[in-house]
Amino acid sequence: MARAILVVEDNAADRARLEQLLGAAGYQVRTAQNGQEALDAVRSARPDAILMDVNMPGMDGFAATRSLQKEEATKGIPVIMVSAKDQKADKAWASMLGAKGYVTKPYTDEQLLAEVRAV
């Protein structure tokens, strides 16, 4: 059975690219447009992993990841941050929040798939 991935991305073009890339690699893909949608989606159908954008309107990726890590039912789901933020502090903060990976935009298809396979 294909692993289920939740893509959380507010940019429609980026979301579509990730959906196509992961779908072509054999993953079942669901999408959310912001952190709150991500929390709702995870609660209704637990994905095997989450690709989480950082900069989003409303609840950002850091806040959504923090919320997921606080809940017993969702804290075991690996989160990979996907962001244009490339500062060491951003990566350190993501790690402190429990993210299992960090991919910086722009990324190659292989970089992204390698991170997904690693979790």
Image (cartoon, helix red, strand yellow):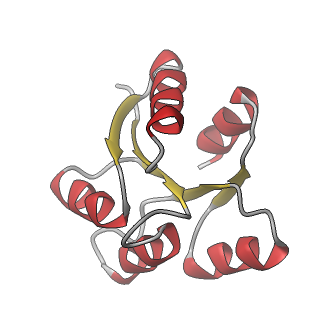
Is 84 or 22 nearer to us in this picture? 84
Please identify the residue farthest to the left as the structure is shown. 44
Q: Residue at x 36, y 71 (%)?
A: 58
Please identify the residue farthest to the top as the structure is shown. 24
Q: x, y (%) of residue 16?
A: 45, 29
Is 95 or 7 nearer to us in this picture? 7
Q: Residue at x 27, y 70 (%)?
A: 73
Q: Is residue 60 above or below residue 103?
A: below
Left or right of 58? Residue 104 is right
User: Could you say which quadrant of the image residue 107 lies in?
Assistant: top right
Q: x, y (%) of residue 10?
A: 43, 50
Left or right of 116? Residue 2 is left
Q: Quadrant of the N terminus?
A: top left
Q: x, y (%) of residue 109?
A: 69, 28
Left or right of 8? Residue 55 is right
Q: Residue at x 45, y 79 (%)?
A: 66
Please identify the residue farthest to the right as the structure is shown. 88
